[in-house]
Amino acid sequence: MTVNITLYHFKNALKTLLIAIIGGFMVQGCKSKQEADQQVGNNAEIQDQNADSGHVAAQKSDTKYILFFGNSLTAGYGLDENESFPALIQQRLDSLKMPYTAINAGLSGETTSGGKNRIDWVLKQKVDIFVLELGANDVLRGLDLKETESNLRAILDKVKASNPDVKLVLAGMEAPPNMGNDYTRQFAAIYPKLAKEYNTSLIPFLLANVATIPKLNLEDGKHPNAAGQYIVRENVWKVLKDVL
């Protein structure tokens, strides 16, 4: 009787041990499958992230840059940065989903001489389209127009030297009538002359339909207000859209 009881306990113990061992293998197998599935999921996520990163990098490499180089008219004097015409150009580009970034390199008070001295630093960045807007401050100071033309030519030369494939856009300006007929005529003639010489696109007059109109300018009567900037944007866009 004692032997039978002991044998009975032994069999139960052995059965329990076998169940435990088999159960352990099953649990380990399930864990291994779960870990494998998790690893596959992680790998897939990593691949997706890498694909997204590659897509973003490709998008960035495809981005082209439009540099607006000028004075306070470009800088958006007296306005918020997002009210300047280069910022409004960026809004237009974004709405059309065009891969361009507009860079506002306007500096209030800049003359053509100052622009010539500053251009080397500005050209350290990538430039695909260069929009040149300078000369108005030369007129306000009554500077020699031969010097103005020479400075503008020097700027264009430096831009072309930095990137022979860059596309050029020249913004024409006009002198106020009080400067005298000869001065006004000679100044206005500079821009089409340079545009032809350098084969650049020409904005005939940056401030067309804005200059001398009080409701479209700040109190100083010289700088476009927020409403005026929208019109300047259209003046620029008429020419720029064919260059993009």
Image: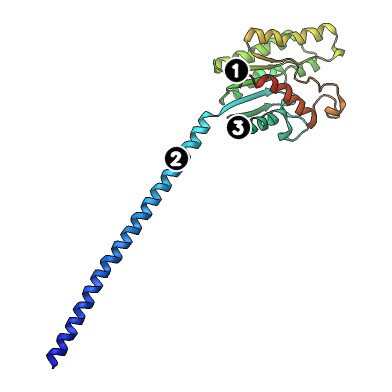
Q: At x 63% / y 33%, what residue is drawn? A: 94
* Type of amino acid at the residue the image marks with label 1: Lys
Above or below for 205 versus 227: above
> Quarter-wise, where is residue 218 in the image?
top right
Front position among marks 3 and 1: 3
Q: Are marks 2 and 1 in contact (CB under 8 Å)?
A: no
Among the two numbered marks 2 and 1 on one chain, the one whose residue lies closer to the N terminus:
2
* Type of amino acid at the residue the image marks with label 3: Lys
Above or below for 165 versus 10: above
Q: Secondary structure at mark 2?
A: helix
- Disc 3 to disc 1, C-alpha distance: 20 Å
- Disc 2 to disc 1, C-alpha distance: 33 Å
Q: Which residue bears the numbered disc 1?
A: 167
Among the two numbered marks 3 and 1 on one chain, the one whose residue lies closer to the N terminus:
3
Q: At x 66% / y 21%, what residue is drawn? A: 240
Q: Which residue bears the numbered disc 3?
A: 97
| Screen quadrant of the N terminus | bottom left
Horizontal side of residue 38 vs 206, given as left or right: left
Q: Are marks 3 and 2 in contact (CB under 8 Å)?
A: no
Please say whether residue 144 is visible from this viewpoint: no
Q: Secondary structure at mark 1?
A: strand
Q: Which mark is residue 51?
A: 2
Horizontal side of residue 202 vs 16, given as left or right: right
